[in-house]
Every structure is written in structure tokens, then in C-alpha cells.
Image (cartoon, helix red, strand yellow):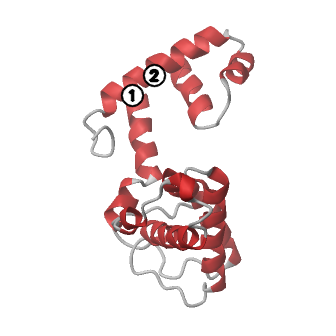
Amino acid sequence: MSFYNNSKPLVSRPFVSKADFENVFKEYFNPLVNFVNKYLHNIENSKEVVQITFVKIWHNREQIEIKTSVNAYLYQIAKNSMIDFIRKNKHNLAHAELNIMQIEQLSDDNASALDPYIVRQAIEKALAPLKPKSREIFELNKFEGLSYEEIAEYLEISKRSVEDNISKVLKHLKEELKNHPYFFD
């Protein structure tokens, strides 16, 4: 079940049942970590902020009623948790050169622009005309996280062939997505 939606909420109280909460957690944990990490530049701190976000949601799940999309709500809560984290750890995070004012000015539109569902959809559409083997190699690397060596072993091809395919697909994607509103501003 997908909770992504840009126009209206799919459910007004998505966190009441444990199963729904777990589904939202599984679907959004990594995208929220990536979002927070763009500002904190520290993956462990970013994971901690997202954990804090979901703990807040769990503790307040009975009172939460979403009037926007689940996506926008989660990104806003993660942003607020990140700001709280920065303020509490300001002296420890000096090296990150964080600008709280910039983070606070992030709009809800920015959260939807970062929507991993839209990004993934655009990439998959751009990948569609490619040869199945090239597409498979790219997806194994970028979506499944396999290394070039692992892909070469799995598909019984050379590492160099994997590198060439990834390079060609990336060039193709750059060309296909250059006019997409979410890429290459």
C-alpha cells in the first residue's frame, strides 16, 4: 500500500493502527533520512532525527489528523525535528555550517519537490525505452544497492560491462530528464 499523494490525504488518521504506522515507517524512513541528510551532512544524525520524528508521531498518533497529504505532513514533521535537533546540538554541529533560517524557510512545495515517488516515476519512465539488460543493471545498482562487482557476478558479465552500461544509462537519463521540472534547475 502506498501512502504517497500530492493532492489530498489518502487517510485522515494514518497512524492509529500499528500496521499502518509500520507501513508508513517502512515507506518513508529512507526518503526522510535522505532529505534530512541534505542539511545535516551526517547520516547517523539524520537517522536519529527521523527516528525522533517517528517516535513523536507514535506518541501522538491518537490525536494526529492530517489535512494535507501524508507525504507533506511527514516532511514537515521531519523538518521541525531537524530544527529542534540542530538547536539542541548547535555546539556539537558547528562543523556542519548549518543555517537554521534556510531550513526554516523550506516550503511545503519543497517537500513535494523532493517526493521520492515522483522522482522514481520520472526515472522509470526515462528508463523504459532502454534495452532490458541495461535497465536491469542500472536498477540493480541504483535501486537495489548492489555494487558493480556484485552485479557482474550475479549476471555473469564483466565488471567493465557493468560500468559501461551504468555510464550509458546515466547519460541517457541526463538527456531524458534535462527538461523535467524536478531535475537540473
Where 147 sits versus 46, above or below? above
Residue 134 placement (x, y as % from top left): 52, 19
- Asked which secondary structure carries label 1, the reply is helix
Residue at (53% x, 67% y) in the render? 82
Q: What percent of the width, then of the height, locates residue 181?
A: 27, 45
* Position in image of residue 14 (x %, y %): 55, 77
Q: Which mark is residue 169?
A: 2
Which residue is outermost to the bottom?
63
How far apart marks 1 and 2 lie (CA) works out to: 6 Å
Q: What residue type is disc 1 on?
A: Leu
Q: Position of residue 126 (x, y in %)?
A: 38, 32
Q: Residues within 10 Å of mark 1 (few under 14, many from 20)?
A: some
Whether residue 129 is visible here, answered yes or no, is no
Q: Which residue shows up at 41% across the image and 53% down it?
A: 114
Query: Which quarter of the rendering shows the C terminus?
Result: top left
At 62% from the left edge and 79% from the top edge, which residue is drawn? 56
Residue at 45%, 70% in the rendered image: 76
SS for callout 2: helix
- Could you say which quadrant of the image residue 128 lies in? top left
Q: Which mark is residue 23?
A: none
| Vertical position of residue 120 compared to residue 138: above or below | below
Per the rendering, the mark at residue 173 is 1
- Residue count near mark 2 (Cα–Cα under 10 Å), binned few <14, some 14–19, many ≥20: many
Check contact, mark 1 vs mark 2: CB within 8 A.
yes
Q: Quadrant of the N terminus?
A: bottom right
